[in-house]
Amino acid sequence: MAWKCPKCGCDNGEEGICRECGYDDSRNYGVRLLPFPLPERVRREYALQSSDALLKEGIACLMKDQEKESAAKAAACFEKAAEKGSARAAYCMGFLYYCGVGTVRDMSLALEWYRRAAVMGDIMAASAVGDALLYGEAGVRNPREAVKWYRMGAGQGDPVCQFRLGCCLEEGNGVPMDQAAAWQQYLLAALGGNREARKRLDMLNRTAALPSASVGGKTRDTGSPAGHSGSEEKTLPCWKAAGEGNVLRLFSSGSGVVFGRALPRKNIVSVTFLDRRIPAWRTSEPGWDVSAEGDGSVMAWLRRGQEGLELYIGGEGGIRAGVSCRSMFAGYSGLRRISFNRCFDTSQTVDMKYMFLGCGSLVELDVSGFQTSQVKDMSGMFASCYKLEQLDMEGFDTSQVRSMRQMFFGCTNLTRVKVRCFNTSRAADVSGMFEDCRSLLEPDPTQLDLPRAILRSNMLKGTEWEEME
């Protein structure tokens, strides 16, 4: 049976790939004929009244009618704007060449324009370059190079690139397979609003077993697993808290490092804070220094318990947090309990963003002793703690917090948050704060006083109060 190209109308027999324009019937290009459905983020550029007159004119042409002359005029506008330095216009040129609208379809030129736009700073273009290289749409398939572009976009916070990078990490496509890192990228993409990432997380949450917590060959109760040197990775900047000593260092948030030790975070099943440097059960196996000053005032030990690897952190008289606790426990997907034992002083902490992000196995978390009077950012602090049912925040002082964006996002089993006074008077961003907290009974989020909240979208989405939003 003869097959006719839906794009140029050429009769191509039964091949499914047009010999004239290159249209491939097996791929979903998202665009066939006019009217031209530009990506949402490009149309938003028009809605926001972009100051770039040529870019705006080009978008207007494509949104105007179904005449081919309009598409050709749009291409001319985009090209002129790109020559003047518009990254978004360069992206639009790549998209036009990709779809063959207003110009001849040319995947090599599309990739060239996408690269140009990405280098100029357009994060949409980074995902487009990655897609073209991953699937070989320009004739050359290069998954490793694709991952580099995805990382570029993911590093700039693009949810699409974060999701694509997560897929590559999960499948080992162009990069060594790393399930924990993939899961973390899915979380970030979901927090950024990517629906595919949310679906993927839901599926993983329903089907995945708890990560293995084997010690990997060690017969002693403490020490680093076999195959790991225990060397520290590069640390993040850390500021000393008020007072003397005992400041906990903030390490890299990578999935393969546990407070500076090369070990997958998913292998840790419990974390316990102690007010002494040497635990009573310590053997001849030494711990490692996790103090900000590098003076041994705060030490960490591992030991193998009945459920898996247990992490202990201790300092004489307790432990002090630095200015930032961002992502401190993010990605500890196998973690079931964190016991601070009122030994963790957070009185000088300003940033708690993503502190417990993605602790999907966590069932016990006592933060009642936290001092939060200086904290300004609690975005995603407990996001995706799926199994957490109750949370004691009675001692929290949230009077200085500016952002509570997606603070409890995805806590699907959370029923009660115990608070004395949830002060939200300075919160400017509460979007997605209780999103998907479908089991929540108290507090009643509709009673929160939000005089400065500018961003409120999806605050109650997926809860029983959704219709009141």
Image: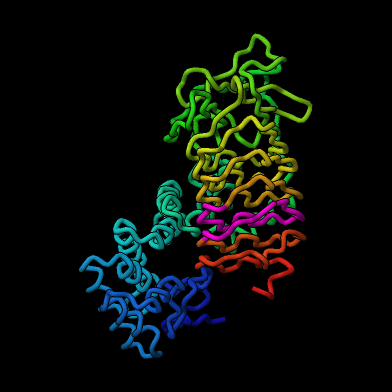
**Which image quadrant is residue 121 in?**
bottom left
- Colour scheme used in the picture? rainbow
Task: Point out the image quarter for the N terminus.
Answer: bottom right
Front-most of 430 and 26?
A: 430
Task: Point out the image quarter for the C terminus.
Answer: bottom right
- Relative placement, left or right, of 234 versus 362 is left
Residue found farthest to the top: 284
**Which image quadrant is residue 218 in?**
top right
Residue 408 screen position, x and y as percent: 64, 55
Residue at horizontal 47 percent and vertical 27 percent from the top:
292
Q: Is residue 119 above or below residue 99?
A: above
Residue at horizontal 67 percent and vertical 68 percent from the top:
446
Front-most of 259 and 200?
A: 259
Secondary structure character of the magenta stretch overall: loop
Judge whether residue 168 is colored magenta.
Answer: no
Q: Is residue 69 above or below residue 380?
A: below
Residue 103 screen position, x and y as percent: 31, 77
Residue 141 appears anywhere in the view: no
Q: How many marks?
A: 0
Residue 247 screen position, x and y as percent: 51, 28
Q: Is residue 21 above or below residue 387?
A: below
Front-most of 108 and 373?
A: 373
- Relative placement, left or right, of 168 versus 19 is right
Residue 407 appears anywhere in the view: yes
User: What range of the chain is rendered magenta?
Assistant: 399-427
Front-most of 395 and 213?
A: 395
Residue at horizontal 69 percent and vertical 75 percent from the top:
467
Judge whether residue 415 is colored magenta.
Answer: yes
